[in-house]
Amino acid sequence: MTPSTRIAHVHISLALVYLVVALLSLVDFILAQFGLAPALGNLYWFRLHMITIGVLAQSVMGVLPLLLARQLRTAPPNPAAQWALLILFNLGLLLLSFGQVLWSQPLRSGGGWLLLLTLTAWLALLVQMWRRAPRPRPLEAAFFLAGPSYLLLGVLMALSMLESWPAPVSTQGVKEAHVHNNIFGFTGLVLAGVALNVLPALFGRSLARPAWVRPTFWLMTVGAFLLWLGPYTGVRLATGAGLLVYVSGVGLMLANVWQTLRRPAPVPSVLSVQWLVSYLWIAAPAVAAVVFALLRPQRLTVAAAELGVMQGLIYGWILPIVLGFLPAVGGRVLGGAEDWNPPISPAEGSRASVILLNLAVAAIWLASIVLPWEQARPMVAAAYGLLIVATLSYVRRLWRMVKGARTAAQA
């Protein structure tokens, strides 16, 4: 392994650890609902941050410099700097996470500041790669710079809440801006970059519509900015316009992926279906808004709608893509593959796991939105059990990939 590849291996190994921790926190919730164990408090945001920061951002932080180096035809950042950022990032995440569980303001604020400083330095390293890359620089690589920029902004929004900085409108607006940055800005743009840069080659294809990359990038980037600006400033018109622009970019990206995977003949892979189906859950906020308008606040509170939206986005959209494609991308990156060979085979992925995972998320989403929480809790607990079962095959596959890369490096 090269030094940068070894660092990526540690990042992915830690992501696997955080994934197991998140699943164990679900086990505690399940047992508590049936009186089999005492309920641990303050685990909701702890669990979401384990998945979004501990698993997703951790993996991106390890793999993205290698993807950018390949895309820009330049060297990855200095290994010493990457090691320092790995340590600081995980220290910040642990401080934030323990602070959430213990409800400790000093720990939460300390973790937030560490994450902000770490991500600032990491983004500076990525920008340096961009600046020293030979011209012309491919626009596809810009997704991998814009995404981390929104993550940095999202952490800044979180820190403003932790430190109780004055908000232009309200704390709720800052909270919504924080979620939009992390979900639509960071996650959406990084996954779009993977979809347009990496996914075609993983399936042994060429991108069907290269000319669509530029409008996709600008639609999603501008849309994500408006989705931050609207809640933060309280301008609903900006939020509505941002949603329309962003969804247009996502639709263009998905149309490109669909044509790539379907022409000249459909790709016979469960993972291709998994990618496309997971994007149905990005519509969760819009569907929840319609349900909210129909049921009115008397029957559906804003908190319940937000709970359903977050469950759909985290467990329906982000988690399946990470579980399905981190082993595929990570294994090839850690193995030093230059041309993404061998392509993904039909054997990679599980049709049963995909079905079970989406059924579990649908049950969680519906119960959280439609039923009062006291009635929804046992149904959500049972659905979490199905979700854990659905993830086991992916966790095993990710473990084999991490272990195999370590064994190959020692050989």
Image: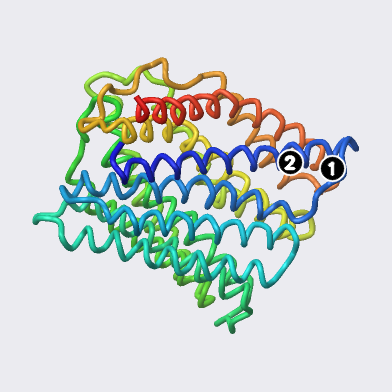
- The answer to whether any part of residue 293 appears in the image is no
Pinpoint residue 385: horizontal percent, then vertical percent: 72, 30
Pinpoint residue 137: horizontal percent, then vertical percent: 14, 54
Figure check: 150 above or below 319: below
Residue 24 or residue 247, whichever sits in front: 24
Figure check: 225 above or below 28: below
Pinpoint residue 173: horizontal percent, then vertical percent: 58, 71
Whether tag 1 and tag 2 are in contact, CB under 8 A, the answer is yes
Q: Determine whether, in the image, residue 59 is placed left or right of residue 199.
A: right
- Residue assigned mark 2: 367
Q: Determine whether, in the image, residue 271 is placed left or right of residue 318.
A: left
Q: For the residue marked with disc 2, what is the amino acid?
A: Ala
**Placement of the N terminus among the 4 image quadrants:** top left
Residue lying at 54% horizontally and 49% vertically, measured from the top left: 54
Residue 346: mark: none
- Residue assigned mark 1: 375
Which quadrant of the figure has residue 292? bottom right
Residue 323 or residue 238, whichever sits in front: 323
State which tag comes first along the sequence, 1 or 2: 2
Q: For the residue marked with disc 1, what is the amino acid?
A: Gln
Pinpoint residue 12: horizontal percent, then vertical percent: 45, 40
Which SS class for mark 1?
helix
Which residue appears farthest toward the front when viewing the image?
410
